[in-house]
Every structure is written in C-alpha cells, then in structure tokens.
Image (spheres, grey):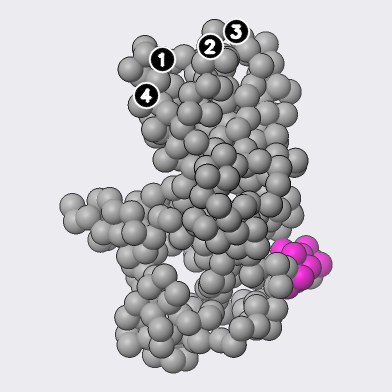
C-alpha cells in the first residue's frame, strides 16, 4: 500500500467525492490559486475549475453564509477555514443557520455542508491562533464534529462527512498535515460516531482524539515497558460520541485517563468522565483523571507552550496515579 501525507489523504477524499458528484464544491481563502494555505487542495483548481474550487475574500461570515445557502438549495459545499480560530467570525452562520435549519424547517431543509480546517495549537502562534474549539461546536445540537488523528481515518471520515446530510465540523491539525502513513487509494468510508481502539490493553483505558492521540499512544508505549497495558481509544468524532466503546473498555480495565487539547471547563473529557461515572461507576477502581491544556490563553514562548499542553509525561503520571493509588 502506498504511503501518503495527511494533507494528501484529505485532498484525495475531496477529489474522489467531487468526481462522483457535481454538486460538491470547495470554497475558502487561498484554496484555488495558491493550492491551499497548507496545500491540501493542491491541483484541485486545475482538475475541477474555478466554479468548483473557489477563492474567497477574507470574510468568513460571508462565505460561510454562502455555503449554508448553497447547501439549503441542493449543493454540498466544503467550506475551508484557514484556521478554526477564524471560524469565530462565522459562528453565527454555523450555529444559528446551519445547525438549526433542519429543525426550524420541520425537516424540509437539510444542510449537507462540511466546515473543515486546522484546530488547536500549531507551535509558536500565541493565544489567538492556538485554540481548540471541538467542545464548543460539539455543544450544539444539529452539528456533527469530527477530529481525525491520522491520514487513514481522515480520508474515510471526510468522505463520510461530505456524504452526510447534516452539517459537519471537520477539524484537523496544522502539525499533522505532513504526517505520512499507508492509505488505500480506493474508496472507503468510516462511519461517523464510531470510536476505534488503537491499542488493546487490560490495565487502564486512555481516551483521546485528534493529534493528542500521538501523546496517548507514546505514553502507552512507555507504560508497556513497565508492565502496564493501556487500552487506547481514539474517539474520532466528539459529536456523536461513541460512549459504548469507552464504557465497555472501562468495565474491562476499571481505570480511565482522558487526554484532550482544550481548556478544562466544559471539555469533552469532563463529559466523558460524567458519563462513565453515571453508567459505570461500580466498575471504577480509582478516580478518573483528565489531562487538558492549562486554563489560560496559550503563550508564545516554547517552554511555556510545553508546560501548557498535554504531554507524554503528564499522561504517564496520571496513569500511575490511577494504577497505584
């Protein structure tokens, strides 16, 4: 099987679906002439033309609204934000239009639209360009929220997102676009709302998603050297959440550590902790541990970034805390 970059897997997903369905188009800042800010859409303008790969002004509220209107009238837009930090400018269209249209129309209007782009930290970009908004969007009924951790999943999940009849928030990471792995060149779809056990284990369950899966898996590899077998679950989507996979794992391991790149208050990790304590409390042999980003805007200095974000050492410490309490 060929090895390709994460960005190429995303491009292949979009291109394969666009070849099948002329109602699908891509719109966003620099997606056409510049081949995408992160080269995700490289070559797509040449293949599909300027009516289906469309450069926009720096006006997220405007082109998000165009996308919602197009989706309400039979098209399937893919709206790219250069970063999800910029989606805040368009959040009225996402929350008050896209997410609510089906309900407010009594089921007469679907809004099959994908909003995609990078989320969370990406190095020394400081406070305004380093925020994880997965839990913000997951809070809103009417949206589905997808956060892939690798190229194989990204391709299958994006294809399913494009085919979905509801609005989907598809969140990537700038720090993953160059990651390489084996990805089939044929069509395959990964259903939304289904978690994946990336590593089987019997001693503790570690739950994460997105690029922080790298931290979770690295910690599991280190823990194995000490005889601790961690089961690592990749949520893949955070709305809907696959609670059953998490609950079944906790019932087996009796311990839970959740790792997430978001601020702690009202985070996905808090939601999962509540669900596990509600439905599997009698199976827990230790309190649940949650590791998040520090409750402060992300600094610029690399030493402070390292101190703020989830890392392998913090996960290992948390696992040992629930193992040896």
Label 4 sits on residue: 222
Going from N to C along the chain, the mark reached first, 4 or 2, is 4
Q: Viewer-nearest of labels 4 and 1?
A: 4
CA gap, disc 4 and disc 1: 9 Å
Number of the label disc, if any, that sits on residue 323: 2
Pointer 1 residue:
228
The local secondary structure at tag 1 comes to loop
First-in-chain label (1 vs 2)? 1
3D distance between C-alphas at marks 1 and 2: 9 Å
Q: Are marks 1 and 3 in contact (CB under 8 Å)?
A: no
For label 3, the SS is loop
Q: Earlier in the sequence, mark 4 or mark 3?
A: 4
Q: Are marks 3 and 2 in contact (CB under 8 Å)?
A: yes
Q: Are marks 1 and 2 in contact (CB under 8 Å)?
A: yes
- Distance between mark 4 and mark 3 Cα atoms: 19 Å
> What's the magenta region?
92-104
In primary-sequence order, the first of circles 1 and 3 is 1
Residue at coordinates 32% horizontally, 65% vertically from top-left? Answer: 8
- Which mark identifies residue 325? 3
Q: Residues within 10 Å of mark 4 (few under 14, many from 20)?
A: some
């Amino acid at each position: 099987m060929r090895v390709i970059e994460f960005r190429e897997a995303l491009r292949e997903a979009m291109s394969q679906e666009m070849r099948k369905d002329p109602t699908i188009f891509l719109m966003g800042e620099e997606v056409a002439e510049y081949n995408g800010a992160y080269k995700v859409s490289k070559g797509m303008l040449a293949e599909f033309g300027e009516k289906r790969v469309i450069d926009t002004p720096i006006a997220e509220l405007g082109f998000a609204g165009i996308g919602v209107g197009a989706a309400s009238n039979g098209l399937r837009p893919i709206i790219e934000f250069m970063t999800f930090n910029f989606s805040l400018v368009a959040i009225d269209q996402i929350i008050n239009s896209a997410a609510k249209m089906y309900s407010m129309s009594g089921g007469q209007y679907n809004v099959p639209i994908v909003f995609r782009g990078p989320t969370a930290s990406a190095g020394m970009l400081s406070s305004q360009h380093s925020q994880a908004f997965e839990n913000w969007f997951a809070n809103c009924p009417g949206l589905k929220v997808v956060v892939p951790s690798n190229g194989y999943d990204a391709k299958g999940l994006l294809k399913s997102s494009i085919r979905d009849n509801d609005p989907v928030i598809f969140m990537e990471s700038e720090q993953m676009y160059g990651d390489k792995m084996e990805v089939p060149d044929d069509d395959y779809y990964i259903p939304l709302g289904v978690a994946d056990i990336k590593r089987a284990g019997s001693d503790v369950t570690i739950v994460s998603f997105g690029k922080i899966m790298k931290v979770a898996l690295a910690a599991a590899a280190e823990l194995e050297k000490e005889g601790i077998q961690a089961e690592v679950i990749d949520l893949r989507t955070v709305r809907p959440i696959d609670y059953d996979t998490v609950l079944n794992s906790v019932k087996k391991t009796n311990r839970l550590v959740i790792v997430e790149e978001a601020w702690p208050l009202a985070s996905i990790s808090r939601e999962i902790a509540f669900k596990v304590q509600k439905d599997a409390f009698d199976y827990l042999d230790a309190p649940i541990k949650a590791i998040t980003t520090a409750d402060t805007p992300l600094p610029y200095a690399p030493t402070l970034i390292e101190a703020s974000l989830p890392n392998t050492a913090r996960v290992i410490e948390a696992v040992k805390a629930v193992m040896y309490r």
